[in-house]
Image (spheres, coloured by chain):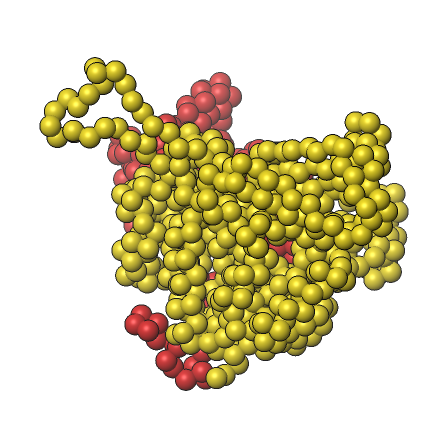
Amino acid sequence: MSGFPSSSHPTSSLPVHVIAPAGGVLPVRLSEIWEYRELVYFLVWREIKIRYKQTALGAAWAVLQPLLAMTVFTLFFGRLAGLPSDGLPYSVFTFCALLPWQLFAFALTESSNSVVANQRLITKVYFPRLILPLAGVCVGIADFAFTFVLLLAMLAYYGLTPGWAMLTVPLWTVLALATALGVGIWFSAINVRYRDVRYTLPFLTQIWLIATPVAYSSSIVPEAWRPVVALNPMVGVVDGFRWALLGTASFPGPTVLVSSLAVLVLLVSGLFYFRSVERTFADIV
Amino acid sequence: MTVAILADRLGKRYRLGGRESYGALRDSLSRFARNPLNAFRPKGEDRDGWVDALAAVSFEIRHGEILGVIGRNGSGKSTLLKILSRVTEPTSGRAETHGRVGSLLEVGTGFHPELTGRENVFVNGAILGMRRAEIGAKFDEIVAFSGIERFIDTPVKHYSSGMQMRLGFAVAAHLEPDILLVDEVLAVGDVAFQRQCLGKMKDVSTQGRTVLLVSHQLNQIRRLCTKAIWLDGGRVRAEGDVGETLRQYEAAVLDGSETLLSGQCFRGWEVAGGDHTVRTPDGPVTIRVHVVVGQDIVAGHLGVSVYDDEDRVMAGWAFEPVSFRAGARTLSVTVPMLPLRPANYRLRFTLFDRGSNLTGGRLVESWPAVPLLALSVPPLSHPQDEYAGILNVPATLSGDDQVAPIDAMHDRPPEAVVGRRP
């Protein structure tokens, strides 16, 4: 009996679940996801462990990848194409944007594939399915932390000292993750029914990278077009990062506002779409 | 006693014709391009049929009861389990569960081969719905139950499947839910471990908790359950006292009215002992199969093969010419031993009349037999699956006088290290 209190309690205290076919628009139960937070923690923990166990380079790869990208960008876009970098060294200018970009791209891939990748779990155990894309988004945070240290070192090397604006970095990080989650929720659910969707993902990521001011500066976009461009939430993220760490220009207020709204629309629509199809996951996957 | 599970006309309807499965967006788009109006047609008008995996199933289980669910493959047992564990939703009816529900549709769900046993215990526990603190508090107990203390920090990929099974079950056994839903997961493993698992399930019910057990092993149901429910084609065919329900079920199997459990002419099988379990690794093993044929079999062919869970043929035998008169017959196949690794296997019986598949004989029936054949024998080969192979045979090692104890610390002859190390 010890360690099992509920059997000695009166039955009225037992949790009652009603199982019935659901109809109409389903509520998104955030409280239930909160109840399952430890599962999110363990799924993320599992993925990170595996990630660093299976790769020979381990954490080094996480750092190497953006460094290589930075080198290539600096060489081709900075030196050869001569893209402006708001008066800063091009390498640190682009690295500062590559960081949130890689976090986003990785989170997007992980969360988009999360439901199909965990089909064994889905057909055997109940838990709120939203946990899967959510956990997928969080896996990249470890990599991000490593590279962020590197970025700080680079800033120090170039003698750039970020001001108090640096405190907003978590905010931009969350915005990047929310963007990945918004799209990832959509993709992870569509992926269950249409397996060819995943092949479009690398292509989408490529186009998205070009549409985001990673290799170039937002300042080359004509003023009138900026609100439209900001519909891509990663524009807000990258501008936010550069503002926080490099102190470029003034606070990108309008851009951030438009980007945040775009993320909100993505997230909310994604949540409801996901909820409406998740009950068929176990039957289809 | 109060109600633990209340099911009220539960139903689950699937669309036939594979609509309920994944496909390619490309195909859907081209379908749409060819006939855009189709997309607006109400789904109900679809010409494809529907199939009721479960139809109006109602029952009630009280706290402390152990309910056994029996029925042939495809009778809706697994669907019922999946609905109650909330893996899938019913399409009609409703059910109520009172208390924390733990479902054990598979042992070791979410185990990752690269992670150690310790790491997997935590992940698996969390997946089954345990809190981190709870797993931490019970960790030592779980490891002790599994009996693999020495390997707990070894990656699970080096475990044998038996060891993984033990660890997975040990975690699940400590879940301590109010209601435990169990699919046929206990049939594997050596006799001692099986007994340990069954004992744990008995404990669970004496503590006032409820168990719902799905099994093909009628003996298991008889030993464990207080009530039974027999599903047939998604409907409840009988329910109530376990002895009475099983009697009806067995009678139906024998007189052939439970035809779908059996094949058309193959009506059932058993190991000579009376159940479906082989318990000695060194045989002999006699498998009896019951057939009912409408006309005489003349110079026919009987094939018997054994498949593992990945449908690989482990062994097979053919008998020719086989002749017998029409009617209900029992054929016995005896092998001197069945030296396969402890696991569940599927038998397939195939009967031809007037020849075989090679000589143009008429196929009477090829029957993938239920229930599964359980080999509950001590493992005798290499403890790690990747080196053990499929055979389960003992071995000894000896050498010339140069192969001798090097010092007094090791003055014992080498012995075979086998599957289940202490």
* Nearer to us in this view, B208 or B102: B208
At x 76%, y 59%, the residue is: B256
* Nearer to us in this view, A241 or A53: A53
Q: Is residue A146 left or right of residue B216?
A: left
Q: Would you identify the image quadrant in which residue B171 lies?
A: bottom left
Where residue B55 sits: x, y (%)?
73, 68
Q: Quadrant of the C terminus of chain B?
A: top left
Q: Is residue A106 above or below residue A37?
A: above
Q: Is residue A46 above or below residue B261?
A: above
At x 63%, y 41%, the residue is: B333
- Total count of labels: 0
Q: Is residue B421 above or below residue B291?
A: above
Q: Is residue B364 left or right of residue B221?
A: right
Where residue A246 sits: x, y (%)?
36, 39
Where residue B219 sits: x, y (%)?
54, 61
Q: Colour of chain B?
A: yellow
Q: Is residue A221 visible?
A: no
Q: Would you identify the image quadrant in which residue B217 lies?
A: bottom right
* Nearer to us in this view, B24 or B195: B195
Q: Is residue A164 visible?
A: yes
Q: Would you identify the image quadrant in which residue A139 lies?
A: top left
At x 31%, y 70%, the residue is: A3
Farthest residue, direction left: B408
Q: Is residue B332 left or right of residue B385?
A: right
Where residue A283 sits: x, y (%)?
65, 54
Q: Colour of chain A?
A: red
At x 21%, y 15%, the residue is: B402
